[in-house]
Image (cartoon, grey):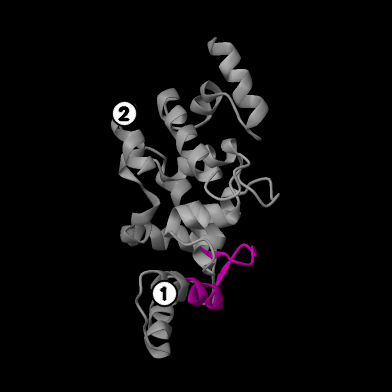
Amino acid sequence: MGCASSKQFKRRTPGYEDPNILAKETTFSVNEVEALYELYKKISNSIFKDGIIHKEEFQLALFRNSSKKNLFADRIFDLFDQKRNGVIEFGEFVRSLNIFHPDTPMTEKIAFAFRLYDLRCTGFIEREELKELVIALLNESDLFLSEEAVEQIVDQTFKQADANGDGKIDPDEWKDFACKNPALLRNMTLPYLNMQKSTWARAVVM
């Protein structure tokens, strides 16, 4: 019966992958991957009910709003969408969430954060990219600062991070900056992702 159930999952869920394989490739246990699948099903059927996560469903899960334009949500979605096909399949969901596991190496979290800020995928973080994302994050927290205050944040960040003064932050400079400012990566770890299945599943799905 268990095998039949597994086959049913594979038929009706695009991108479904064996929890045992995903557990071997990530920091998650098999039980945690199975709990993630329950969360995945809930999100992927919240609007379109087709078993894959669309951007509107992803944004609804993150911010309780499926229509409000949000640069931060768009960027996170793009990084989760590893196949670049406009949706998030189950395997992509698990591998991407692995970055936020407490036991994931800090170097991987730093690299993910760099890609998050590198909006134009140039391999550098430029002033305008940083400014755009800072504004998006502030707006999402209902914090609205003056143009001057935002510029001061950007100026201070570049003063500390742009070691060679070329007007952009490269991966090595970002790594050094993140190591000196650990609070920068505070949101890159979700503590409940390594709890036991029963407690963890309730925490994630709520």
- Residue sitting at x 41%, y 69%: 140
Q: Quadrant of the N terminus?
A: top right
Dot 1 falls on a residue whose secondary structure is helix
| Real-space Cα separation, disc 1 to disc 2, in angstroms | 35 Å
Q: Is residue 130 magenta?
A: yes
Q: Nearer the viewer, residue 47 or 36?
A: 47
Up/down of 52 relative to 174, above or below: above
Q: Image quarter for residue 183?
A: bottom left
Residue furthest to the top in view is 1
Q: Nearer the viewer, mark 1 or mark 2?
A: 2
Q: Position of residue 89 (x, y in %)?
A: 61, 40
Residue name at image x 53 percent, y 77 percent: 127
- Three-letter code, disc 2: Ser
- Mark sitting on residue 198: 2
The answer to whether residue 102 shows anywhere in this view is no
Which segment did they paint magenta?
117-133
Crowdedness of circle 2 by 10 Å Cα count: few (<14), some, many (20+)? few
Q: Which residue is mark 1?
A: 139
Please, what secondary structure does the residue beneath circle 2 have?
helix
User: Where in the figure is residue 199, as x and y percent of width and height?
Assistant: 28, 32
- Position above or below: 172 against 11: below
Q: Quadrant of residue 56?
A: bottom right
Q: Nearer the viewer, residue 57 or 89?
A: 57
Residue 128 in magenta stretch? yes
Question: Which quadrant of the view contains residue 50?
Answer: top right
From the viewer's perspective, is 198 left or right of 135? left
